[in-house]
Amino acid sequence: MRYFLAVLAFLGTLQATGATAQDGPVVVELFTSQGCSSCPPADAMLHDLAKRDDVIALSLHVDYWDYIGWKDIFGRPENTARQHAYARAAKATMVYTPQMVIGGVQHVVGSRPMQVVDAIRQQAARPNVVEVRLARAGDRLQIRATARENGDYVVQLVRFTPQETVDIRRGENAGHSYSYVNIVKAWQTVGTWTGGDPYVVEVEASGPNGIAVIVQQANSGPIVGAAQLR
């Protein structure tokens, strides 16, 4: 526990050390499940990451542990499909929880703080290819992206709930109450883009949920730009 707290403290000072050389936030995707007994430490770490301005921390609950006694109320087959797509891109033979995918390219065990810290530092040192700016007016969101180089990009809109607490009554975590942050409720492709001219589009963005826009190379490649509104 003392080691874990020390690493979290180091996480909190990461920005002050000059590790955030890039001009946009690092995207951290946590693939987790309420039915996974090894996931709570990773879920707790995401709370700390979600407080940072230089990180977009997203919790993607999968559904493949539902059979062991507790159906994850946030589990989405789309999240499972995204994790499998990352595995195929990395030529990995399996998926697991808790897994963090950082910057779309680095896969680490989400309950290993030092691995997470190192991966965030590495991605923060990589300049973003795409600058993303968001402007919200009522129920409309304007997305504007500019690229330093051409590519095969996918522009994605993510909707997430900032925080919810769940009492788990069955399965491996039965009898515990856990709080989850930035729970992904929808992940949609807004469009594709080659990066030549600025990408400008307006989309519907009603409701209280948080919003992130992620620009990623096609076929589950690196994330090249991102921004969020809370």
Image: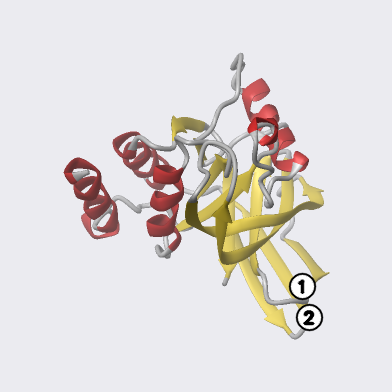
Q: Residue at x 39, y 44 (%)?
A: 41
Query: Can you see residue 25?
Result: no
Which image quarter: residue 96? top right
Name the one closer to the observer, 142 or 95. 95
Q: Residue at x 66, y 46 (%)?
A: 72
Above or below, 37 relative to 11: above
Above or below, 89 relative to 21: above
Q: How is the image coloured?
A: secondary structure
Name the one closer to the observer, 41 or 186. 41
Give the left or right position of residue 184, taking residue 204 as reference: left
Please give the label number shown on residue 139.
Answer: 2
Name the one closer to the observer, 204 or 111. 111
**CA–CA distance between discs 2 and 1?**
5 Å
Q: Position of residue 108 (x, y in %)?
A: 44, 31
Kind of residue at disc 1: Ala
- Quadrant of the frame with the C terminus: bottom right
Q: Are marks 2 and 1 in contact (CB under 8 Å)?
A: yes
- Quadrant of the frame with the N terminus: top left
Q: Which residue is mark 1?
A: 205
Q: Residue at x 53, y 32 (%)?
A: 97
Q: Position of residue 33 (x, y in %)?
A: 58, 41
Query: Can you see residue 121?
Result: yes
Q: Residue at x 30, y 50 (%)?
A: 19
Identify the element where label 1 is drawn: loop
The residue carrying pointer 2 sits among few (fewer than 14), some (14 to 19) or many (20 or more) residues within 10 Å by Cα, namely: few
Which image quarter: residue 61? top right
